[in-house]
């Protein structure tokens, strides 16, 4: 090879490494840019309202300059917690089944099922919620409790969400259970424990941090979900008192009002604050989940 | 005592099995509901025409604007994300391979970024657009969706690139290959099937996203002719039509939902098929 060609190759390598580095830096900077941008846009509202007032006031009247996020935060929390309560045990049992008991044919079906569940767009879940869950709740479930409801409520939203977060929780749980050394479970089995006792006393105990991590990832997913929840939650600005009440979660608030926010003073600032809150809450749960799982893997 | 243990074993064993079946059943139920509601309303007119006058009151027309808009948007965003994401994934795995701590923190950050809801990206994009006085457009939609799918794409690619054996890098190095050559000739080729899967996964995310494009791409009844125009998208078209009180319009939303579901299923099957096909190009160890 000539010297010129050699030089050209090294030169090309240098150039490439520079622009690739620049792109890496840009990608890494995005979350900080988002956080800063949202904070900048929402900072205006702090000149007139205190943070505690914004978070704990129940009054949401943008035209009167009242921005209390409390009803939306409560709705979001209720829907998210309920969704994880429904989804969590099912995922836990399914993960136990898949890693401890299942024959390989169920495993083979399950992987594509999880992938497709993760791939279905949010809006399709919303449509399904309207077609199936809403009538099911209003016609079959609510009458059992002697309650009349349109079906557009917190419970419906939680059911739809609980299915949407299955792939995220289940995938992590499967990895967690697979990471636990077989020697441990085999030792328990050889001591005469039944399969379930081994799972209960050894596996679940060992996997506990991993399970917590999976659930908090589920929470962070559920908290930010927008369109599907918006379609079935009912969207009434009121602090919900039970799960058959309509709710109005934070993401739905942003999605429903961005059109008119420019015509009312401070409205855009308030909605950007809602987005910032969402960003921070999701980040916290996500961070917690990732740190727990990283620690768990290190200990294995 | 023994009996109780046996009952407990059988009980939990069947509960565990039931949970797996329940999850499969849920997916079946979702797809079945969408087909059952959507199929009767589906017609050739629906997928081949743009909305005509009075479309949103149940008159003639179709959702071609949304189908084409979504394809434009998802293709554009996937293309941009690929241009940025692939080099980043390669850089992490080839150039930074010795800096384990740094790479781990980058992975950690990307994982966290993956979890940021699309509406936050949408709101951020909207804030930036207002700041610069920009209007909603196909281009703005593409840019925001690109930001949204980059972490997904990079992490998915990274997961396969990190499985490329270290020996391959070392032997290429010892033959005198530069890092660029190792990245684009060896690593790229070795993980090609997984890179395709990652790209299709991102495409699926892009086409199904509603919250980010709601703020940035706008909505229109015509097919966008340039990047500066607004663009309709399938998820939003479904969402808007479904909020109508008119039965006809609602039915068309179900049909549109079926179209979107079919697109997503095709992507999923395609990625499985392509992965199998390209596997033969890989050097096995």
Image: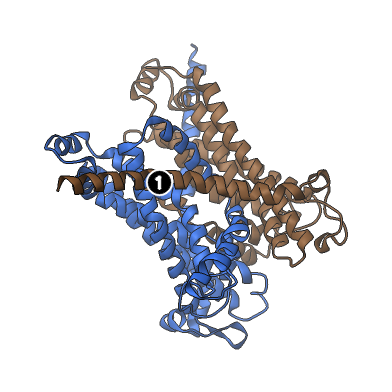
Q: Which chain is brown?
A: B
Task: Name, please, the residue furthest toward the top.
Answer: A1
For this view, does B144 lie left or right of residue B155?
right
For this view, does B1 lie left or right of residue A45?
left
For the residue carrying disc 1, how many other residues have a C-alpha within 10 Å: few (<14), some (14-19), or many (20+)?
Answer: some
Corner quadrant of residue B9: top left
Please state the horizontal and vertical placement of residue B250, each as a whole percent of the image: 73, 59
For this view, does A107 lie left or right of residue A178?
right
Q: Nearer the viewer, residue A220 or A101?
A: A101
Q: How many marks?
A: 1
Residue drawn at x 50%, y 81% as measured from the top left: A68
Q: Disc 1 designates what residue?
A: B18
Residue drawn at x 51%, y 27% as measured from the top left: B193
Q: Is residue B256 visible?
A: no
- Identify the colour of chain A in the image: blue
Task: Name, please, the residue furthest toward the left.
Answer: A191
Task: Name, please, the residue furthest toward the bottom.
Answer: A64
Image vertical order of residue A55 relative to residue A107, above or below: below
Please state the horizontal and vertical placement of residue A44, each as a whole percent of the image: 52, 78
Please state the horizontal and vertical placement of residue B234, each as a whole percent of the image: 69, 51
Question: How are the colours assigned in the image?
Answer: by chain
Q: Nearer the viewer, residue A58 or B216?
A: A58
Image vertical order of residue B53 relative to residue A49, above or below: above
Q: Nearer the viewer, residue B273 or B87?
A: B273
Quarter of the image with the C terminus of chain B in it: top left
Corner quadrant of residue A300: top left
Secondary-structure class at tag 1: helix
Residue drawn at x 52%, y 85% as measured from the top left: A59
Residue drawn at x 83%, y 60% as measured from the top left: B58
Image vertical order of residue A41 relative to residue B165, above or below: below
Check the residue under mark 1 and report the chain it is in.
B
Q: Is residue B64 visible?
A: yes
């Amino acid at each position: 090879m000539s010297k010129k060609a050699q030089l050209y190759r090294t030169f090309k390598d240098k150039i490439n490494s520079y622009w690739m580095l620049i792109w890496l830096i840009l990608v890494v900077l995005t979350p900080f840019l988002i956080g800063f941008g949202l904070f900048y846009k929402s900072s205006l509202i702090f000149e007139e309202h205190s943070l505690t007032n914004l978070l704990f006031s129940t009054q949401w009247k943008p035209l009167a300059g009242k921005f209390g996020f409390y009803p939306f935060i409560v709705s979001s929390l209720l829907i998210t917690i309920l969704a994880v309560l429904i989804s969590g045990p099912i995922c836990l049992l399914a993960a136990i089944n898949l890693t401890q008991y299942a024959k390989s044919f169920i495993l083979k079906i399950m992987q594509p099922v999880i992938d497709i569940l993760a791939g279905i767009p949010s809006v399709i879940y919303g449509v399904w919620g309207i077609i199936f869950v809403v009538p099911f709740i209003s016609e079959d479930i609510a009458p059992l409790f002697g309650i009349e409801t349109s079906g557009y409520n917190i419970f419906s939203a939680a059911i739809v969400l609980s299915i949407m977060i299955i792939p995220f929780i289940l995938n992590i749980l499967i990895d967690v259970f697979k990471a636990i050394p077989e020697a441990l479970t085999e030792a328990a089995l050889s001591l005469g424990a039944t399969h379930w006792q081994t799972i209960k006393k050894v596996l679940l105990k060992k996997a506990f941090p991993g399970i917590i991590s999976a659930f908090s990832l589920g929470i962070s997913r559920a908290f930010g979900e927008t369109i599907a929840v918006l379609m079935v939650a009912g969207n009434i600005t009121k602090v919900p008192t039970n799960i058959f009440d309509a709710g109005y979660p934070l993401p739905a608030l942003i999605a429903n009002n961005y059109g008119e926010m420019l015509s009312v003073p401070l409205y855009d600032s308030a909605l950007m604050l809602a987005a910032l809150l969402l960003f921070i809450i999701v980040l916290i749960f996500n961070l917690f989940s990732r740190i727990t799982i990283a620690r768990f893997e290190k200990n294995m | 005592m023994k009996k109780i243990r046996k009952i407990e074993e059988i009980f939990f064993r069947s509960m565990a099995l039931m949970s797996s079946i329940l999850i499969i059943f849920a997916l079946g139920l979702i797809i079945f509901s969408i087909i059952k509601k959507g199929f009767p309303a589906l017609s050739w007119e629906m997928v081949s025409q743009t909305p005509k006058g009075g479309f949103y009151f149940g008159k003639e027309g179709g959702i071609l604007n949304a189908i084409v808009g979504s394809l434009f948007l998802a293709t554009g965003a996937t293309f941009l994300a690929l241009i940025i994401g692939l080099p980043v994934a390669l850089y992490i795995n080839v150039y930074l391979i010795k800096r384990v701590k740094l790479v781990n923190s980058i992975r950690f950050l990307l994982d966290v970024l993956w979890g940021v809801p699309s509406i936050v990206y949408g709101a951020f994009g909207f804030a930036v657009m207002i700041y610069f006085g920009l209007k909603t457009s196909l281009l703005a939609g593409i840019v925001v969706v690109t930001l949204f799918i980059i972490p997904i794409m990079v992490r998915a690619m990274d997961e396969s690139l990190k499985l490329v054996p270290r020996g391959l890098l070392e032997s290429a190095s010892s033959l005198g290959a530069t890092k660029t050559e190792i990245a684009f000739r060896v690593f790229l080729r070795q993980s090609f099937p997984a890179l395709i899967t990652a790209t299709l996964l991102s495409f699926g995310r892009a086409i199904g996203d509603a919250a980010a494009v709601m703020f940035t791409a706008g909505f229109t009844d015509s097919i966008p002719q340039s990047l500066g125009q607004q663009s309709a998208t399938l998820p939003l078209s479904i969402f808007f039509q479904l909020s109508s009180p008119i039965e006809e319009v609602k039915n068309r939303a179900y049909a549109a939902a079926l179209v979107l579901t079919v697109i997503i299923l095709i992507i999923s099957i395609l990625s499985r098929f392509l992965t199998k096909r390209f596997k033969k190009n890989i050097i096995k160890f």
